[in-house]
Image (cartoon, grey):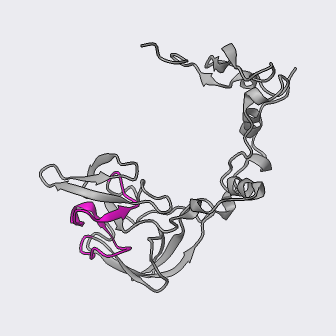
């Protein structure tokens, strides 16, 4: 009888595999569209690091004394005044519908559907830019960081500028301990050992004189947890035959 594999241990929980969510700053999303459709202003009161995400977050105190959290734009400063709404100016850090933003402008934290609070282009240093508007259908075409072009409802909101924290991954980690704590902050396993490099007692792929998974690389969907590794109920495996 072998040992319990890592996916089994992770599924059970425990302090080693549990994310430190008590340190996270919470939800970061736009306020409701109905409340601030005409427009409202706010002041940046602080910019903070959030262990749960790659980008810093900005705390905004609105004119009605409501406090919200937003993804910080590059160049945003404490004390800076930002605007939210259809009548906001196209300035760095302001939030307005895509249909009100001029073509070629860089944007981030984009809503896929009006009112969802912002879903894409939220990682540090990323930005998309507006390619064109199609007024007849009410769509705006965006070029994403992946170079893919998508069509989004023109009433969806976005923030002007690019996400702060660019160049974060350019500095090398140097020590393995730094990588360990970087992964631990997000509930990621590090270091991650390949199953074929283990002994048979530790993993179904372990053992043998070389790294070959054989038939154990694909398993049934009903396989018990101790052997559920590799491809789960695949339609096919291996290279395609021409």
30 vs 237: above or below: below
Q: Residue at x 83, y 22 (%)?
A: 200
Marker count (numbered):
0
**Image position, residue 206 (x, y; %):** 78, 24
**Foreground of the two, 233 or 163:** 163
Q: Residue at x 32, y 71 (%)?
A: 36
**Image position, residue 103 (x, y; %):** 22, 62
68 vs 225: above or below: below
Q: Residue at x 72, y 59 (%)?
A: 174
Query: Where the C terminus falls, by quadrant?
Result: top left
- Left or right, 212 with respect to 65, comes to right
**Image position, residue 208 (x, y; %):** 80, 19
**Foreground of the two, 19 or 180:** 180
**Image position, residue 34 (x, y; %):** 31, 65
Q: Residue at x 61, y 19 (%)?
A: 221
Residue 164 in magenta stretch = no
Q: Residue furthest right?
A: 1
- Left or right, 62 with respect to 2, comes to left
Do we see residue 33 in this rendering? no
Query: Where the N terminus falls, by quadrant?
Result: top right
- Left or right, 218 with respect to 113, comes to right
Do we see residue 230 in this rendering? yes
- Left or right, 84 with respect to 184, comes to left
Q: Considering the whole magenta stretch, tell me its main secondary structure.
A: loop
Please state the extent of the stretch shown in magenta in the rendering. Answer: 86-113
Q: Residue furthest left?
A: 136
């Amino acid at each position: 009888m072998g040992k319990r594999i890592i996916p089994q241990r992770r599924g059970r929980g425990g302090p080693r595999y549990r994310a430190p969510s008590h340190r996270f700053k919470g939800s970061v999303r736009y306020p409701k569209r109905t409340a601030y459709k005409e427009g409202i202003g706010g002041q940046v009161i602080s910019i903070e690091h959030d262990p749960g995400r790659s980008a810093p977050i900005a705390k905004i105190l609105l004119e009605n004394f409501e406090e919200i959290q937003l993804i910080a734009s590059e160049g945003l400063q404490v004390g800076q005044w930002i605007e939210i709404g259809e009548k906001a100016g196209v300035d760095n850090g302001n939030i307005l519908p895509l249909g009100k933003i001029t073509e070629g402008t860089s944007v981030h934290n984009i809503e896929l559907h009006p009112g969802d609070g912002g879903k894409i282009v939220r990682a540090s240093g990323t930005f998309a830019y507006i390619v064109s508007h199609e007024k007849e259908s009410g769509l705006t075409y965006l070029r994403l960081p992946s170079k893919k072009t998508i069509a989004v409802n023109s009433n969806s909101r976005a923030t002007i500028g690019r996400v702060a924290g660019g160049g974060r991954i350019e500095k090398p980690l140097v020590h393995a301990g730094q990588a360990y704590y970087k992964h631990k902050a997000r509930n990621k396993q590090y270091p991650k050992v390949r199953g074929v490099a283990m002994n048979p007692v530790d993993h179904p792929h372990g053992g043998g004189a070389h790294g070959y998974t054989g038939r154990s690389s694909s398993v049934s969907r009903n396989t018990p947890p101790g052997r559920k590794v590799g491809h789960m109920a695949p339609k096919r495996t291996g290279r395609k035959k021409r």
